[in-house]
Amino acid sequence: MTQFISKKDLLSWLSQLLEDRYLVAPTKVDELTLFRQVDRVDDIVFDFDNTTLSPKEWFFPPSETLFYVERKDGGVELIPATIERETAIFGIRPCDARGMAMNDYPFLAEPADALYRQHRDKTTLVGLACLTTRPECFCTSMGSGPHDPANLDILLTEVADGYIVQVLTDKGKALLPDKLITAADVSPPPVPALSDVPSGDISEKMRRAFDDPFWDRLADRCIHCNICSYVCPTCYCFDVRDYTDKERIERVRSWESCQSPGFTRIAGGYDPRPTKGSRLRQRFAHKLLYFPEQFGALACVGCGRCVRACPVNIDIREIIQDVQQLGVKSEA
Amino acid sequence: MDLGEQIRNKAKELIEIETVDCVIGYERATDGVGARPLFAYKPEEVDRLIFDQTCTHNLAKYLLNRKDKATAIVVKPCDSRAINLLLNESQIQRDKLFIIGVACPGITKTGLNNTSEELQAACQICQQHTPVIYDFLVGEPPASEPDIAEAYADVAAMEGQSAEERRAFWEEQFSRCIRCYACRQVCPGCYCTECFVERLDPLWVGIRIAPEENEVWNTIRAFHLAGRCIACNECERVCPVNIPLSLLNRKLEEEVRELFNFQAGMDAETPAPFATYKKEEVFPEIG
Ligand code: SF4
Ligand code: SF4
Ligand code: SF4
């Protein structure tokens, strides 16, 4: 027996959620699918492959105020930003749920990032299993899969007239009332197959490929925009700047990327990553070598967004394959 | 002989007799249907060169990374205008360049795994099917260029809207911008060593990725390309959130054509309107 919710009950549940929390869900904006905060269930799209941008913007927004400093009674007062309201994100894909779990490693390592912590605590993740995939998807090679329930609070899998429900955490339980769920004898749809990307042992191969001219050659083509970092669910670099006026300072952080030419430039003008090749290598070395060394997991979840959005076809799947070969060559 | 084969033959000759040490062209992308830039240094790499209607990238931007190195480059007509722009602005040297021009059949709407046969919007109204500068031409240039009456139909449609409608439209578009700077990075006309957007002193625009800052970013970039944009439309192609940047660029292009009878990159000599001062020029009345 599986647990089941009808399409009609799902819709009324989602409209109930609107009453006491933000509901974030995939919506159509021109030809894009974007997670947006919705005010009506009618704006939600249910039939989408994956969103153009990842759900990370709801935990680590493109820009966010960290705190204010204000003049008060002859002194100054620091006012931290706080997140008041609960949020439910509907329609998260399994790869992206894993992506959010990957971001927990750096952001929640002590001392935890206070704002990220609040976003995480106040958000419940309702996943949607993938019935179809895109040609760029490779989640099964990166520790997840089209029907993977890990790192979600609830997973829904679409079947005729409704969804199979898996309530996975206490947060999920609190969000979805028992009375809406019935027991039913429906079998889940088949898990779509994906082609393999040879990620096994990739960290060691990356280490060996560090000084290979491969990176400079690859960087010939790279235009060093920030698309790959900004569409990626697990890229988490940012820059911090103060917006100041007479009475108040506002400290703001915004997304930044290791691909920007000035990213590692320091006082005096020195840049430890001065070449295009060293910058491009950083993105892949971080995901496939440094992050696993530090936290024990690869920091790519195989969502395929960077593959899809790169203007010049820098394709992480091909890079993993090529680096495996470089490793073989240097062993010989 | 198909276009790819003509390019490969020429490229091999150039590499073998060491006229250049690199040929910048196109190869097949990982989706098996699209194209991507290729830097070929060796004869066996030259074998990977292709040309077909998926070869959308304007490769001229890459010349800025090879300023002092002898380079051959494959250009479509719009891309060839970028070479003129860069020569005109003294950014590259003609004697370091070997230009393989392609008489262009038009580029189809591209994107990963996309096999659409429909031409891109810019190609549907293209009036320049032969490169404006080249050393070696492949393909058959058309006997005459098409006469396109409604070349600025998209701009006219935008101008047909009220100021409020236009504001609402652009506010929505710019609010989506994630300031990835892909439009800038891909643009042959954007080569400042320090872009205004990254400048701290004076601070032109803050780091926030938010509607107000995005609007400043997008409009100033558009103005910096006035009379310089060569209409390759790469900026719009690469934008990950589909902001119709061509509308801004084409509006400015139309203005510059009307006021100065000038189109960027048609030759390498005519001084650009905003790089010239003529005493007799009067500021037009703005209605
Ligand atoms: S590196 Fe690319 S495929 Fe991997 S998680 Fe990031 S965007 Fe997705
Ligand atoms: S490419 Fe698009 S999203 Fe990126 S900075 Fe330019 S306009 Fe903004
Ligand atoms: S502004 Fe856009 S269309 Fe114009 S030259 Fe730059 S990339 Fe090409």
Image (tube, coloured by chain):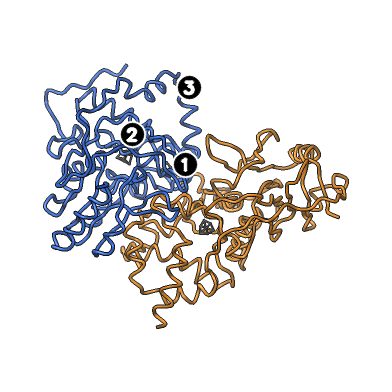
Chain colours: A orange, B blue
Q: Which residue is mark 2?
A: B123
The disc, 1 or 3, on the residue closer to the chain's N-terminal end is 3
Q: From this view, report whether residue B249 is shown above or below residue A329.
A: above
Report, in whole angstroms, how far the alpha carbon at label 2 lies from the one at label 1.
25 Å
User: Neighbour class for label 1 at 10 Å: few (<14), some, many (≥20)?
Assistant: many
Q: Is mark 1 within 8 Å of ligand 2?
A: yes
- Chain ID at mark 2: B
Whether marks 2 and 1 lie on the same chain: yes
Q: Nearer the viewer, mark 3 or mark 2?
A: 2
Type of amino acid under label 1: Cys
Q: Is mark 2 within 8 Å of ligand 3?
A: no
User: Neighbour class for label 2 at 10 Å: few (<14), some, many (≥20)?
Assistant: many
Q: Which residue is mark 3?
A: B164
Q: What residue appears at the point 33 percent right and 24 percent down from the top-left corner?
A: B152
Q: Which residue is mark 1?
A: B177
Given residues B34 and A20, the one toward you in this image is: B34
Q: Secondary structure at mark 1?
A: loop
Look at the image and tell me whether residue B196 can be seen: no
- Chain ID at mark 1: B
Type of amino acid under label 3: Glu
Where residue A112 appears, as percent x and y from the top left, is 62, 64
Type of amino acid under label 2: Cys
Task: Using the rendered view, name the quadrant where residue A16 is placed.
Answer: top right
Q: Secondary structure at mark 3?
A: helix
Residue B196 numbered mark, or none: none
Report, in whole angstroms, how far the alpha carbon at label 3 lies from the one at label 2.
31 Å
Q: From this view, report whether residue A260 is shown above or below residue A12.
A: below
Q: Nearer the viewer, mark 2 or mark 1?
A: 2
Where residue A156 appears, as percent x and y from the top left, is 74, 50
Q: Secondary structure at mark 2?
A: helix
The disc, 2 or 1, on the residue closer to the chain's N-terminal end is 2
The disc, 3 or 2, on the residue closer to the chain's N-terminal end is 2
